[in-house]
Amino acid sequence: MAAAHAPLRLLHLLLLLISSTALSLLAPTSRSQTAPPPPPLSPPPPVINRYVLPVHKDGATSLHVANILRRTPQKPIPHLVDLNGGMVWEHCDERRYLSSTFYAPPFGDYFCSPAGKTRFSRTCPGSVVAPDRAGCHNNSCGIMAVNPVTKRTAVAELSIDMFSILTTRGSNPGRPIRFCKFYFACAPSSLLRSGLPANVHGVAGLGRTPISLQSQLASHCGFPPMFALCLTSVSSNDNRGVIFFGDGPYNMLPGSMINQKPVPLNTSLLGDGRTGISTTTPYTILEHSIFVALTRSFTSELSQIPQVEPIPPFPACYERSRLPSTRAGPGVPTIELILQDKNAVWTIFGANSMVEAPGDALPGFDVAGSRLGLSSSLLLRRTSCANFNFTSIAPQAE
């Protein structure tokens, strides 16, 4: 929270956003009719079909970062979380990338096929050939990697290595599970030179491609490609968040209309990428006329509160002391986003519509079904995205 009288700035709306196997058991052969019956069987432990990845928000850029556990021996590699990214890539630094399980398939190899269309690539200067060095081959499957902030692209080397992630049954993490064939790309250092948090070594893409992070987990584990983001704000007491992979429920510890009035919009402008959910921009980007209409309706509902000098790029600012305080942030008009019909509405409270207010929401993505599920502010449930219990390890069945 900012100090009293600090201006609040209206956001561009952060949209972010068992099978049990039947068991047949044969009773042991008994020599006596009076033998006691066998003891009742304990129910089988539930199948672990969800995984959890800790995330934190970088204070300097307001972008979300996750440590991806890869290589042998295992090492955490900080990656920018990109909701729309098509793959996981990192700068491998061929002289420092140490892993006994690294493999770069040659161009035309069967192992290149999951990446779709690739190109013949030379990633080493001159005639150098170093088959055991990451990011340095002269016959590799080239794939385009993108810096999602600067939009700069570069040819990267499709590679395979070990990947590890924590399991969960919903409330806290369990033991990590390792996957020996995880696709990523070794990209040149030029993609890291601007726009990304200082310590980041790559990008973790969650998009709808066969080699994105969520797609590979779903493919390896046999669950539908579904995941949920709970990304907290820097101004919260704790800037941690979490990504769940697999179906819910997802448990935390306790802890478009304006005020139900329609906003006049040209709904044809809501497509074509003009309004969408992203993890690589601090605030949602709206088409100009949509933003103007929404801001006008919002300020009209808040006309009894005088505005203060605006702070670019935000046109509507208020003194914090003039706004009532609620469990879900400043007491400002609610914003209802009608996503498909009146039965699919995302209600946004002040905690998520005003800058500097600590507010968390939980969007869930059903990739296979092309569906988006949303929660309202978790603050209404006395919890936040920082409250996933990473301090306790769930018991695991042997």
Image: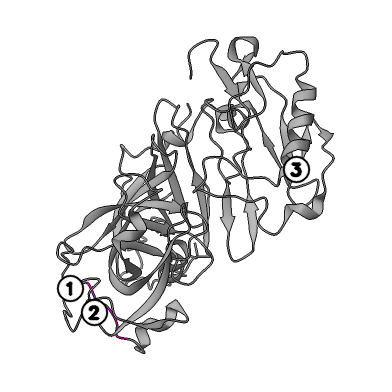
Q: Residues within 10 Å of mark 1 (few under 14, many from 20)?
A: some
Q: Tell me if residue 390 comes above or below residue 277 in the rendering.
A: above
Q: Which residue is mark 3?
A: 290
Camera-side residue: 113 or 386? 113
State the image coordinates of residue 375 (x, y, percent, origin top left): 61, 40
Q: Which residue is mark 2?
A: 137
Give the label on residue 133, or none.
Answer: 1
In the image, taking residue 386 as reference, residue 137 lies left or right, namely left
State the image coordinates of residue 105 (x, y, percent, origin top left): 29, 82
* Amino acid bearing label 2: His
Marks 1,2: beta carbons within 8 A: yes
Residue 203, by quadrant, is bottom left
Give the CA distance from mark 1 to mark 2: 8 Å
Q: Tell me if residue 325 comes above or below residue 158 in the rendering.
A: above
* Amino acid bearing label 3: Ile
* Amino acid bearing label 1: Arg
Earlier in the chain: of badge 2 and badge 3, it is 2
Residue interval drawn in magenta: 102-106
